Each structure stands twice: as C-alpha cells, then as structure tokens.
Image (cartoon, rainbow, N blue to C red):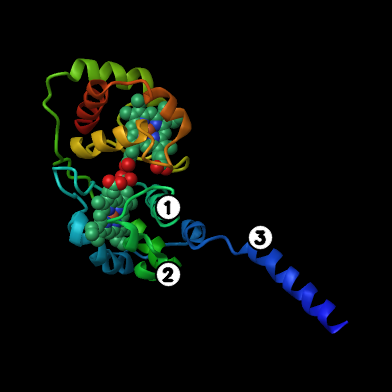
Amino acid sequence: MKSFIVFCVLIYQAIINSVFAQDVYEQALLLKSNLEHGKNSYKLCAACHLDNGAGKKNGSFPVIAAQHKSVIIKQLKDIQYKHRDSPTMYPFSDAKTIGGVQAIADVAAYIESLPDLGNNGLGSGERLVQGKALYLNNCTGCHGLDGQGDAQLTFPRIKSQHYEYLLRQLKWMRDGYRANSNPDMLDLIKNMSDLELSDLADYVSRL
Ligand code: HEC
Ligand code: HEC
C-alpha cells in the first residue's frame, strides 16, 4: 500500500511538473521586468554586443538593441536547447549564467529599451532596386514594410541589422544550418542564389 501511495505521488508530481513547470524562458515571457536590474545583468552581454547593443559592423556580433523582448527570449531559449547552433552564445543563453527567470525577463526588456542607433554595417548599395523588389515580394508579410517584425508573433526586427550578419543568417537558414528557422520563410529563400540573398541583406540593412 505504502509503495502504491509513493507511486501515485510520483506520478502526480510528474504530471504537475510537465503541466505547470513551463521552462524558465516561457516563464520569463510572462514576468514584469525591471530595467535597472536588466542593465546590471546586461554587463555580461556588453563584452560582445557592446554597451549600446550595436554589435560589430563586420557582423561577428549582431545588433540586439531594440529587438523585441519576446524574440530575445526565444533566441536565448533556442540557443540553449540547441535549436540554434551558436557556440559563442551558448554559455550566455544559460538561465543560470544570466541569473534565473527574473534576470532573463529583465535583461531582455533592457535590450529592447536600448535605442536603435542605425549605425550598422551596410552592403555595397549597388543592387538596392533588386533587393527592394525581392523584399517587397517575399518578406513584408512577417517582417513588415519597414523590417519591424512583430513582437506578439515573435517575428524578429531585422531593420538596421549589420549586412554581414543578415547575409550569414540567410545563408545558414537556406543551407539548413539554423534549425529554428521559420518553415514558411525557408520555403521563400530555399531556391535563392547568394546574389539574391546579398541583395536582400543590403536592402534590409538600410531600412
Ligand atoms: C562572447 C560573445 C557574446 C556574449 C558575451 C553574448 N553574446 Fe549574444 N551573440 C553572440 C554571437 C556571436 C551571436 C550571433 C550568433 C550567430 O551568428 O548565430 C549572438 C547572438 C545573440 C542573439 C540573437 C540575435 C538575433 O538577431 O537573432 C541574442 C538575442 C543575444 N545574442 C543575446 C545575448 C545576451 C542577452 C547576452 C548576455 C546575457 C549575450 N548575448 C552575450 C555573442 C555573444
Ligand atoms: C512567414 C513569416 C516570415 C516570412 C515571410 C519571412 N520571415 Fe524572416 N523570419 C521569420 C521568423 C519567425 C524568424 C525567426 C526564426 C527564429 O526563431 O529564429 C525569421 C528570421 C529572419 C532573420 C534572422 C533574424 C535574426 O535576428 O537572426 C532574417 C535575417 C530574416 N528572417 C529575413 C527575412 C527575409 C529577407 C525574408 C524574405 C525573403 C523573410 N525573412 C521572410 C518569419 C518570416
């Protein structure tokens, strides 16, 4: 009888855990954020993304300033769970390194609050007509006319991102190296040439 009760308690706990204990990233999405605390945690991130969140023009580190909080949290989660391969970011997407659920909510809100300085790396500017046509025909449905994305739907803000970073991500997605890619987006870019992806990246970097 005793072992049966222990068994029932264990089953009960397992059910409760799976239903209510959403992972820390899901929980962080629902919390109110404290920007001051976020600023403090952000010191960890500034080493690469810089104090103003502008990253590097050569695209080694992306602009994260002004990105939607929901998108930041989703990316941290995807990187941590290896849905997105990013070895450099891996230790910094760990909830424990960042400081727990509240710290994730705070740092993501702080990053979202950083102004977009628009001082990002650009492409050659030689094929903006082609880039614009490709963008308007394929991308505005999710990322918007101005590249703002959609916080509710976790469509990333891509405007004024570094050209080199955009191009790298587009190629990685097309070539199957970014597991968390959006399948509908993938359909649109899977047959595009390097030149077309470059046209798109150049146009988007100037939005
Ligand atoms: C050691 C350098 C480094 C540190 C420190 C770092 N990052 Fe990153 N981060 C990167 C790199 C590199 C990438 C781009 C990865 C890729 O190309 O896929 C990235 C990508 C990201 C992205 C995805 C951006 C996008 O547009 O999809 C987010 C969000 C992010 N970092 C947030 C953070 C946060 C929050 C911290 C601090 C807790 C942090 N990073 C600390 C190097 C770093
Ligand atoms: C059906 C909606 C949809 C369409 C259409 C779409 N995207 Fe996306 N895009 C997404 C989503 C969702 C993500 C984020 C995937 C993830 O979670 O990593 C994304 C990610 C990206 C990223 C990576 C952003 C980052 O910060 O790492 C780039 C760049 C991008 N899209 C460019 C484009 C371009 C250019 C087009 C047009 C050819 C396009 N997208 C069309 C939904 C879409």
Q: Amino acid at mark 3?
A: Val
Left or right, 79 with reference to 159: right
Of the image marks 3 and 1, the number of the one nearer the N terminus: 3
Question: Is the residue marked 2 within 8 Å of ligand 1, measured from its CB?
Answer: no
Of the image marks 2 and 1, the number of the one nearer the N terminus: 1
- Quarter, ligand 2: top left
Whole-angstrom CA distance, mark 3 to mark 2, is 20 Å
* Residue under label 1: 82
Q: Residues within 10 Å of mark 3 (few under 14, many from 20)?
A: few
Q: Residue at x 28, y 21 (%)?
A: 193
Left or right, 15 with reference to 4: left
Q: Amino acid at mark 2?
A: Gly
* Residue under label 2: 100
Residue 144 spot, x, y in % from top left: 36, 29
Q: Residue at x 15, y 40 (%)?
A: 120
Q: Amino acid at mark 1?
A: Lys
Whole-angstrom CA distance, mark 3 to mark 1, is 22 Å
Q: Residues within 10 Å of mark 2 (few under 14, many from 20)?
A: some
Where, by quadrant of the figure, is residue 77 drawn?
A: bottom left
Q: Is residue 1 above or below residue 48?
A: below
Question: Is the residue marked 3 within 8 Å of ligand 2, measured from its CB?
Answer: no
Seen as rendered, the residue at the extreme bottom is 2
Of the image marks 3 and 2, the number of the one nearer the N terminus: 3
Question: Is the residue marked 1 within 8 Å of ligand 1, measured from its CB?
Answer: no
Left or right, 23 with reference to 16: left
Residue 52 or residue 55, whichever sits in front: 55
Left or right, 42 with reference to 75: left
Residue 115 spot, x, y in % from top left: 23, 49
Q: Residue at x 32, y 51 (%)?
A: 86
* Residue under label 3: 19
Where, by quadrant of the figure, is residue 10 drawn?
A: bottom right
